[in-house]
Image: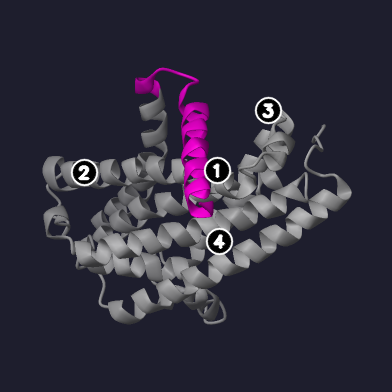
Amino acid sequence: MAIADFARSTRESFLVGWKIESNWTDPVLFATYRLVQPLASLLIVAFIVIIGGSLPGPGLQKAYMARIIVSNAFFVYVAQITTNMGWLVNTDRSRYEVLKNIYISPGTLHPYFVGRGLVSVVNATISVIVTLLFSVAVFNGILNLQIPINLLSANLLLLIPATLLGVAGLIAVGYMLAAVSIVSNRLEFILGESVAGVFFLLGGVIFPISALPSWVQPMSAALPVTYFLDVVRDSFGLSATNHLFDMAYLALSTVAIIIVGILVFRRAELRAKRLGLFDRKSEY
């Protein structure tokens, strides 16, 4: 019964979150808004590589270009989940002033945050699919660069489990970001984007870990995002890593992050209850 109640509350929270994020404009403009950002980010990096490859030297590194396309496409999960969940508490507490009502309701905040995080997952999934199709159409179709990406030959037995584990871990990270936002009233403006920026730099999105300074590489090697993207690239035949080790590390780290996320949230919840922070408004 408890699991059924949690699932029902999560579903209702998802529907509420979807309406909040999509009903401010017509569907066409909303879809355009959701797709432009990841496509713009991809095009900026891709054309830098293309222009650099046209200069005297080794030329365009097609395998590296393929790595950038796939990594940027799937990094959308990281960016959207961390940013949206990091901003969620401030929006519901200060703008809509409903956080305290949700907290005292039978559903509580736990399924609510999970449901709202799943909205970001759906949006990100659409962006990933469109970004990959757009990349193949533009770089291999219009520009005829012959980038070694074959979407139809992707190893789904690697891609689907890696994506599910990566998304679960990212929602747990977002859970922790929401917990931090509950007990603070300043960090929410930079928290999610800062975490996404760290993951972007250290997660092997643009360049391999070996290109980072030696003192940074251990931190990069400890991040689950690094292994998530490694397995994703491997599913497209773009990585030579040990995908079994990567999947095992990703699974164990996801479980660990979920446990830590629950503990952090409970600690923040107790502090917020003691100090009366659930109905605090940020005034500037």
Q: Residue under circle 3? A: 96
The disc labelled 1 sits on which kind of residue? Asn
- Relative to residue 17, is residue 231 depicted above or below? below
Which amino acid type corresponds to the residue marked 2 in the rendered image? Leu
- Kindly give the residue lying farthest to the front in the view shown: 1
Of discs 1 and 2, which sits in the foreground? 1
As measured in the structure, the alpha-carbon distance from the residue carrying label 4 to the one carrying label 1 is: 16 Å
Q: Is residue 87 magenta?
A: no
Q: Main secondary structure of the magenta part?
A: helix
Marks 2 and 3, Cα distance to the nearest angstrom? 37 Å
Counting residues from the start of the chain, the first of labels 1 and 3 encountered is: 1
Q: Nearer the viewer, mark 4 or mark 1?
A: 1
Query: Which of the two labelled residues, at mark 2 and mark 3, occupies the earlier sequence position?
Result: 3
Residue 15 locus on image (x, y percent): 47, 33
Of circles 2 and 3, which is in front?
A: 3
The residue pinned by badge 4 equals: 198
Q: Which residue is mark 2?
A: 133
Of the two numbered discs 3 and 4 in the rendering, the one whose residue sits closer to the viewer: 3
76 horizontally vs 53: left or right: right
**Disc 1 target residue:** 84
Category of crowding for the residue at label 1, using alpha-carbon neighbours closer than 10 angstroms: few (below 14), some (14–19), many (at least 20)? many
Q: What is the C-alpha distance between the residues marked 1 and 2?
A: 25 Å
Nearest to N terminus: mark 3 or mark 4: 3
**What's the residue at 82%, 38% (across, down)?**
280
Dot 1 falls on a residue whose secondary structure is helix
Q: What amino acid type is highlighted by mark number 3?
A: Tyr
Place of residue 117 in the rendered image (x, y in percent of width and height, measured from the top left):
50, 46
Q: Real-space Cα distance between discs 2 and 4? A: 27 Å
Task: Provide the residue span drawn in magenta.
Answer: 1-29
